Amino acid sequence: MSPVKDAASAPSDANPATPLESLATFCAELRFADLPQALVAKTKVHILDTFGAALAGTRSREFAVAMGAVSTSADNGTRIWGTARYADPRDAALVNGVAAHAFELDDTGGCDHSGAVVLPAVMAALASVTVPTDGRRLISAVVVGYEVGRRVLEAAGGYDGHNGAGWHSTGTCGTIGAAAAVAHLWRLSPAATRDAMSLATSFSSGLWAFIHDGSQAKKIHAGRAAEGGLLAARLARGGLSGPSQVFDDVWGGFFRSFGQIPGDLACFTEGLGTVWKLNRVSLKPYASCRGTHSAVDALSDILLDSGRSAADIARINVRLSAMLLGMCGTKEAGTLAGTQMSLGYALAARCVFGDVGLASYAANRRHDPRTAAVFEMISFEVDPAMLPMDEPVLTVDFADGARASLMVPRPTGSPERPMSAAAITAKFRGLAEMAMPPEGLAALQAAVADLENMSDCRSLEDVLGGGTASREAFI
């Protein structure tokens, strides 16, 4: 499959398409029929997973604050998921994106958090279509968003290079992915799609400064990226041109400005149409930063293989990269946002509660004195030989003198170690029921399962309405 310009519109040999133009043409001309069935199935899993994360996120403080910052109505605009309220599409993209990322349970491995960026943007974009948009178009738009967000990140030096420079790629690269997804949904031309993607760079933002004090700022990045991508596509549709050289090695260019590197533009087109970036994206079974997940799995595997329990542990040593130490190498049980970034707490929660799901991050559990006791057993050791993205090596010393070490190369939820279908369903239902009654979440699950046969995706807004669930904030 190669959705590129036909001979009549193709650039001449003397004026070949730039990598940005080629990627934009791919996004504009991609068809649902071009998508492998396995990719379609995985896309629907990620759509449902994002809805579940967002519905639970309506119980977060971040959601409440975001809702208070926008104007809503009872019957006009785009649905705020899990509620009876509507807002302007841009405001809805912002608020729904915040909800999807609020509890760290949205997917990872794309832009990084592609689901929380792309889905709120394309759902908000449905309000601006003049003819019904079917489920096939929605699916292909989501695929485009994941594709572009990841390819821009890879061109920017990858997760370690771009995020290591202090930028949160969900907010920076995700904005461009959201713009491409909306442009595809709206059937913009290749030229307008290029403009949407290049305009989106002016809305790229998001710093890792939140890591130092448990700030809630991280949760806003996904919503701002969804909103910015939608705005960029809207401006491009209106005829506003984007900076055509923004991805070139020029002063003021994206890669020079964000990372002081020229950028690897081969990433824009390498394997395009055959290597689908959504296929590398992981689901998150644990309500914590992805950087903690391999260590949690290593601890669980060690206990399972040894036939011991957490009560038998005397010490836990974590050998890790300097980057992972800076990102997650704390033993913290303070704010919810800060605790979710703590590798020490994730391990302590696994030891004390046997689980690292959302319930283990409730205030009463974060301040359980037993977790503080486990903190005393945990030590972190930077290995200078480790690459930034290397997974940690966990060494557990048991009270009887036995020792076990393990490194899990890819955690649960990854393509290499996938969650079971039953676990995926259980996660969705457990999260969605925080905002919807059983009949509502069953209807949503059925709608997404049959999404490719839906004739008008605007009907999803009715399914996403709120129920009678408690609105008490989860803290």
Image: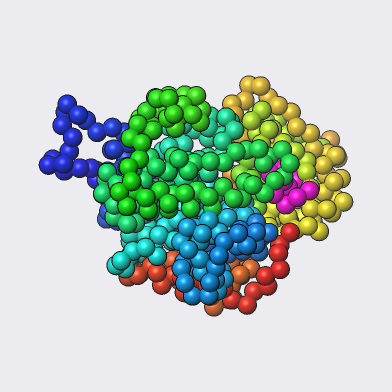
Quarter of the image where one finds residue 468: bottom right
Farthest left residue in view: 8
The magenta-colored residue range is 334-348
Quarter of the image where one finds residue 274: top left
Residue 67 belongs to the span the image colors magenta: no
Which quadrant is home to the C terminus? bottom right
Q: Nearer the viewer, residue 421 or 206?
A: 206
Residue 303 visible in the picture? no
Q: Nearer the viewer, residue 106 or 403?
A: 106
Residue name at image x 87 percent, y 51 percent:
369
Residue 341 belongs to the span the image colors magenta: yes
Residue name at image x 83 percent, y 44 percent:
374
Residue name at image x 82 percent, y 49 percent:
371
Residue 122 visible in the picture? yes
Magenta residues, dominant SS class: helix
Residue name at image x 15 percent, y 31 percent:
12
**Please, is residue 21 above or below residue 127 in the view?**
above
Residue 276 at x, y percent in the picture: 38, 44
Residue 459 at x, y percent in the picture: 41, 72
Residue 171 at x, y percent in the picture: 53, 44
Horizontal relation, residue 192 to residue 113: left or right: left
Q: Nearer the viewer, residue 216 or 4?
A: 216
